Image (cartoon, rainbow, N blue to C red):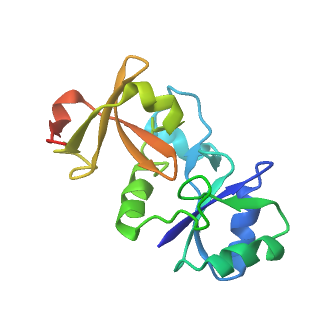
């Protein structure tokens, strides 16, 4: 199970380091800080930076008491995403869903964009499956955003928009 954590003041990497020192497995979506037209083979010459600021994920069994106690153990402010407004429990993400999200968020896949669900509400698309290439089998929503086609993979209110060719997807019945 993965638990999404919201941070403040761009402290996601500092909190990730503290959690790692506590023995926790974490994930922060990263990207190369490179100009748009940089050839793929040159990306490694640029620094990796968080792709989505103020967000990280911790891999552990859900325990609300642990989540609430974490705030006292970490030197930086953080909060947990709730399932619904007024709910007492925090959001969790299943391992298989997070595995897909992590694949799509790989910095080696140049061109992935990150948007909030609110930014994509008007772009609601049809459910598709990638039928060939490095992301074959991934299921997401097919959207058009800024005159390009993407497959949107959503988790914890954030969407990773992966560039995709129209011919590389098959439409599924919702």
Residue at x 72%, y 74% (from the top left corner): 68
Point out the residue furthest to the front here: 86
The percent coordinates of residue 158 (x first, y second) are: 51, 45
State which quarter of the image contains the C terminus. Answer: top left
Left or right, residue 147 beside residue 165:
right
Q: Residue at x 83, y 62 (%)?
A: 76
Position above or below: 43 against 95: above
Q: Quadrant of residue 73?
A: bottom right
Quarter of the image where one finds residue 127: top left
Q: Residue at x 26, y 51 (%)?
A: 138
Q: How many numbered tags mark residues here? A: 0
Residue 154: x and y in percent read 42, 47
Q: Is residue 145 left or right of residue 51?
A: left
In the image, residue 119 above or below residue 155: above
Looking at the picture, how far across and down is residue 89, in whole percent? 58, 68
Image check: 51 left or right of 109?
right
Q: Position of residue 69 (x, y in %)?
A: 75, 78
Name of the residue lying farthest toward the right: 75
Above or below, 1 against 110 in this view is below
Which one is in front, 27 or 153?
Answer: 153
């Amino acid at each position: 199970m993965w638990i999404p954590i919201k941070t403040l003041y761009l402290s996601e990497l500092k909190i990730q380091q503290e959690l790692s020192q506590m023995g926790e497995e974490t994930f922060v979506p990263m990207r190369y800080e490179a100009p748009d037209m940089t050839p793929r083979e040159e990306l490694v010459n640029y620094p990796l930076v968080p792709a989505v600021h103020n967000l990280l994920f911790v891999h552990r069994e859900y325990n609300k008491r642990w989540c609430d106690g974490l705030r006292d153990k970490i030197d930086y402010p953080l909060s947990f995403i709730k399932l619904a407004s007024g709910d007492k429990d925090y959001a969790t993400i299943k391992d298989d869903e997070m595995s897909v999200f992590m694949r799509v968020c790989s910095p080696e896949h140049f061109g992935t964009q990150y948007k909030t669900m609110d930014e994509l509400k008007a772009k609601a698309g049809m459910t598709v499956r990638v039928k060939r290439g490095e992301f074959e089998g991934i299921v997401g929503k097919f959207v058009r955003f800024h005159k390009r086609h993407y497959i949107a993979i959503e988790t914890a209110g954030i969407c990773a928009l992966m560039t995709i060719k129209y011919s590389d997807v098959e439409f599924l019945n919702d």
